[in-house]
Amino acid sequence: MHASTTLYHGPIVHSLSLDELEYAVDALVCVSPDGIINWIERNVDTSEIQDRAASHGLILDGTNNAVEIVQLGGHEFLCPGLIDTHTHAPQYPNLGLGQEYQLLDWLSNVTFPREAMFSDSTYATAVYEEVVKRTLAVGVTTASYYASLHESASKILAETTLRAGQRALIGKCNMDRNCPPEYREPSAKDSIEATRALISHVRAICPAGGPTAPLVQPCVTPRFALSCTSELMASLGELVAEDPSLHLQTHLSENTAEIKETLDLFPDCESYTAVYDKYGMLRKGTILAHCVWLSPAEMTVISDRHAGISHCPTSNFNLMSGGARVGAMLDEGIEVGLGSDCGGGFAIGILSQIRDASKLSKMIALNASTSEPSKKRKYSDKPLSIPALFHMATLGGASICNLKDRIGNFEAGKEFDALRVTPGASPGFFLDVGEDTTATSGSKSRQERVEVLKRNFERFLFVSDDRDIADVWVQGRRVAGSRS
Ligand SMILES: Nc1nc2[nH]cnc2c(=O)[nH]1
Ligand SMILES: [Zn+2]
């Protein structure tokens, strides 16, 4: 843990809801040594820091080494860390490969052969070190990971994220059918035993208790209904029923051929969603990836069960799966986060997902018929707004990972998972003439500086890369960043 309380002074941007971002240019954020946001004050001039801190019992007279002040400069700002609600750690070496395939052929020809290589723990260690390092560098402070089916490599992934300080959900894939013999679990019983072993291991290396949440938590991961026998699905349903706090993630309704095969395998279920519902898998804390082809009735079931959806637009474009109707999901009251789905998607991190989610929503809006106005349709068939996009990247993601009480925005009592953005280092981030860093230092009013902050935040979402992410903190600890 960290020796000192830290006071961050400068601009912040964070999500308050799907429709609202807060832009505050002179915020003072107090983070305790264990990484919790103690309090936030707004409209604090530099000359007022000492008094505001004193009002919270913090004495800053130059002798108090237990308090560190981090002063943001120029056009810098803080925003919450990005949350990747769906990604596959063993698929990163495949990024960019397999362009000629759609989902089922891509799994057989590209994905399963790569994942099979993770029976080798030395290989898993080397790849997972890189995956965690790179995803932290692009600002992913929390990731919901699928590992391979191997118990040992899954444990290695959990240990790697913990060591690097990345918040993570870790799942070992359950798959006992419809996969090649060399990459398939021998039985439902073996699959359950390995899953229980992973859950115990993750909870042992990262126990609950103390002021902060366990950084790394287990996640039950039936790969998708096609890869699980009814026996395995039933056993996994029983496993999660034992513990309402267990996270669960799976794929749902990604590709039309996949949907057809699933319904053939589960003829008693009226929809793909009904398969997971039958086995008690739809509940708060369940992350359903893709959901491209859901019917309105399926969306209602997901909403009623309080399960969340991980929208993975880059993957859905890349594997030609289709375009998920995120606006309709939001109108149905479903919480939605963003997922990179590497290597179905070829872009790491969540900035690319914000961009692709925006483009897709504009395509959907262009193609929509305008003839069905209804009071329920606030988001359907409309471009996603900046607040909605950033909500999905942070607070919405936290919500579907069942971590909304801990992370997702800057609220007193939550943990400090944050990025310091230093605009201008990536070539696309073009600060306009008159918007140079010195211009903010005194001559502009607070309202004028909020307008500059809004512009820089929008540029960050659409043109930045990791060069603009100077610091990455998780639970108050600096874990990555381009600042040397
Ligand atoms: N995109 C994607 N869909 C899947 N469905 C089952 N497994 C996978 C996977 O690894 N990636
Ligand atoms: Zn996936």
Image (tube, grey):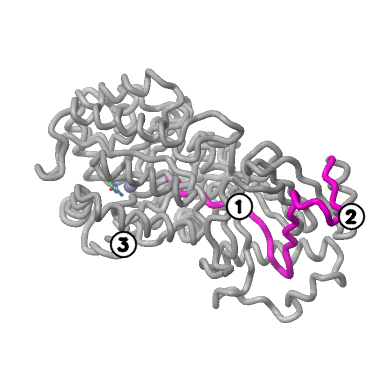
Q: Disc 3 marks which residue?
A: 95
- Residue lying farthest to the left in this orientation: 181
User: Disc 3 beta carbon < 8 A from ligand 1?
Assistant: no
In depth, the one of 303 and 230 nearer the eye is 230
Residue type indicated by callout 1? Ala
First in sequence: mark 3 or mark 1?
3
> In this picture, which residue range is highlighted in magenta?
57-85
Q: Is residue 90 left or right of residue 39?
A: left
Residue type indicated by callout 3? Leu
Q: Disc 1 marks which residue?
A: 418
Q: Is residue 334 visible?
A: no
Q: Secondary structure at mark 3?
A: loop
Q: Secondary structure at mark 1?
A: strand
Give the quadrant of the C terminus: bottom right
Q: Measure how far apart labels 1 and 2 are at the Cα level.
A: 24 Å
Location of residue 182 by image quarter: top left
Within-10-Å neighbours for mark 3: few <14, some 14–19, many 20+: some
Residue 481 drawn at (x, y percent): 55, 63
